[in-house]
């Protein structure tokens, strides 16, 4: 969730998307007004393994058909100019994100990341059934009554889905003393508050606050979300002198999560985050053998589940790629990763992603001549921001081979095709050429 502040939900807390909807969103909103329906914007990308999980396992069947009768669904690839513009407008931070708007373009809520089928439809149905904007929901949080507490839980969960810790705490600070008392005594609301305080500390890079709030969050029952919270803890407090004992205390709950959510029958939607976070935990503790053994076990498990059907489940296939990549970095032996990458390239021949990844990996290992054909293959299918990213790697490979004129030509072609979009990536490509001049 895999891995900027998101839109705030209460007037006065900060900026919200305010530009007049245009293009595909305007068309979707008009269709929603005609049907008196909601709009669901599905933010995804071709490199997003979680998006492939959702497409294969969740966004189909009778439940999804029922959603299509209730809402207008707008697909947005964030590698495209239109998708990136909407991503920035709505401050979408991780993929996939399912943003739910009413027919006037006001946010009802959002669902973030991989979800089980049961959880996704429960959350989406709740948003569609509620039908009220988040500002209206926040206005119901007035005191101690059950309706106020229920609304507060939903508001806090919405802030967490937006990854907006500071906005949540700003909103919470303006509540009445009665509301504060009610939320402090409500177990669900209190846990959301702790997670938001932890998120805010991580976003501010406050290691001491991360240590304190992370310890509280990680004591709770988190289910599959434990991997995300532990990953956050490792990132923001892992180097703190007092963190080691808290990290070590996560061995048992993470092993239980691995046994049930990865290698058991109650699999987490995002198996990969559980495996890699557990490996990061072992690495932080200096337990290299445990780290490698876990990744080997996860890779063997996936290889058995995939068998010869490489293209049957892209989420699983890409998870195996990630595990083999981790093992290659640990051992220095890239033979298994390289062999798997060739199978992925063959399984998705009309896609830029795997030739790009393989070429980039070869180039990073100093194999520019081997990398270039794969990067050229990726360029044939690249578009939007990934056109610039592929061009950057092609330029680096050509420069390494002493082909400066070809490098300048590739950069110029990519920049011309790009036009005014993606200024940061365009500036990086221009700087690469200037630096070699």
Image (cartoon, rainbow, N blue to C red):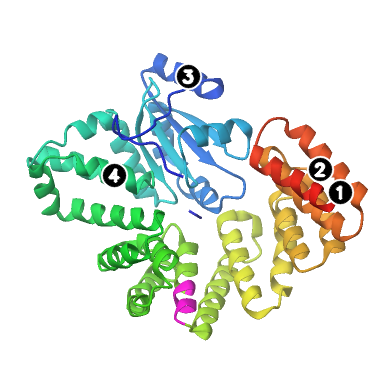
Q: Which residue position holds label 4? A: 168
Taking the image as shown, residue 430 lies to the left or right of residue 241, namely right
Task: Indicate which disc residue 411 carries.
Answer: 2
Taking the image as shown, residue 364 lies to the left or right of residue 195, namely right
Residue 102 on image: x %, y %:
36, 25
Predominant SS along the magenta part: helix
Image quadrant in which you'd find residue 84: top right
For label 3, count other residues whose C-alpha is less than 10 Å away and answer few (under 14), some (14-19) or many (20+).
few
Residue 181 on image: x %, y %:
9, 49
Q: Secondary structure at mark 2?
A: helix
C-alpha distance separating marks 3 and 4: 26 Å
Q: Is residue 248 above or below residue 197?
A: below
C-alpha distance separating marks 3 and 2: 34 Å
Q: Residue at x 73, y 59 (%)?
A: 360
Q: Which residue position holds label 1? A: 407
Residue 374 on image: x %, y %:
80, 55
């Amino acid at each position: 969730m895999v891995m900027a502040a998101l839109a705030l939900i209460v007037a006065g807390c900060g900026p919200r998307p305010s530009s007049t909807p245009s293009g595909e969103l305007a068309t979707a909103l008009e269709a929603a007004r005609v049907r008196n329906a909601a709009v669901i914007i599905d933010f995804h990308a071709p490199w997003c393994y979680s998006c492939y999980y959702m497409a294969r396992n969740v966004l189909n069947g009778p439940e999804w058909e029922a959603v299509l009768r209730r809402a207008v669904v707008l697909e947005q690839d964030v590698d495209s100019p239109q998708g990136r513009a909407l991503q920035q407008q709505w401050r979408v931070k991780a993929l996939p994100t399912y943003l739910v708007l009413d027919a006037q373009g006001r946010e009802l809520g959002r669902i973030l990341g991989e979800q089980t089928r049961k959880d996704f439809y429960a959350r989406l149905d709740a948003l569609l059934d509620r039908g009220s904007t988040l500002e209206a929901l926040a206005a119901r949080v007035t005191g101690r009554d059950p309706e106020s507490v229920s609304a507060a839980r939903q508001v806090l969960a919405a802030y967490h889905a937006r990854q907006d810790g500071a906005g949540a705490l700003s909103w919470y600070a303006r509540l009445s003393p009665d509301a504060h008392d009610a939320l402090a005594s409500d177990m669900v609301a209190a846990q959301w508050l702790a997670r938001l305080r932890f998120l805010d500390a991580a976003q501010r890079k406050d290691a001491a606050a991360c240590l304190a709030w992370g310890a509280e969050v990680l004591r709770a029952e988190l289910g599959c979300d434990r991997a995300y919270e532990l990953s956050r803890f490792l990132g923001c407090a892992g180097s703190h002198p007092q963190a080691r004992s808290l990290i070590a205390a996560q061995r048992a709950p993470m092993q239980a999560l691995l046994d049930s959510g990865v290698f058991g029958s109650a699999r987490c939607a995002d198996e990969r985050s559980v495996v890699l976070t557990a490996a990061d935990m072992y690495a932080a503790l200096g337990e290299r053998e445990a780290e490698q053994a876990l990744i080997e076990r996860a890779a063997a498990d996936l290889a058995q589940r995939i068998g010869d059907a490489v293209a049957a489940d892209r989420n699983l296939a890409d998870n195996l790629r990630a595990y083999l990549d981790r093992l290659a970095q640990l051992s220095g032996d890239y033979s298994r990763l390289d062999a798997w990458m060739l199978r992925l390239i063959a399984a998705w021949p009309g896609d830029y992603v795997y030739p790009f990844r393989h070429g980039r990996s070869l180039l990073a290992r100093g194999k520019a001549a081997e990398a270039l054909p794969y990067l050229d293959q990726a360029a044939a299918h690249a578009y939007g921001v990934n056109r610039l990213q592929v061009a950057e790697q092609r330029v680096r490979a050509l420069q390494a081979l002493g082909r400066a004129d070809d490098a300048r030509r590739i950069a110029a072609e990519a920049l011309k095709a790009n036009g005014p979009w993606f200024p940061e990536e365009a500036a990086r490509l221009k700087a690469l050429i200037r630096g070699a001049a």
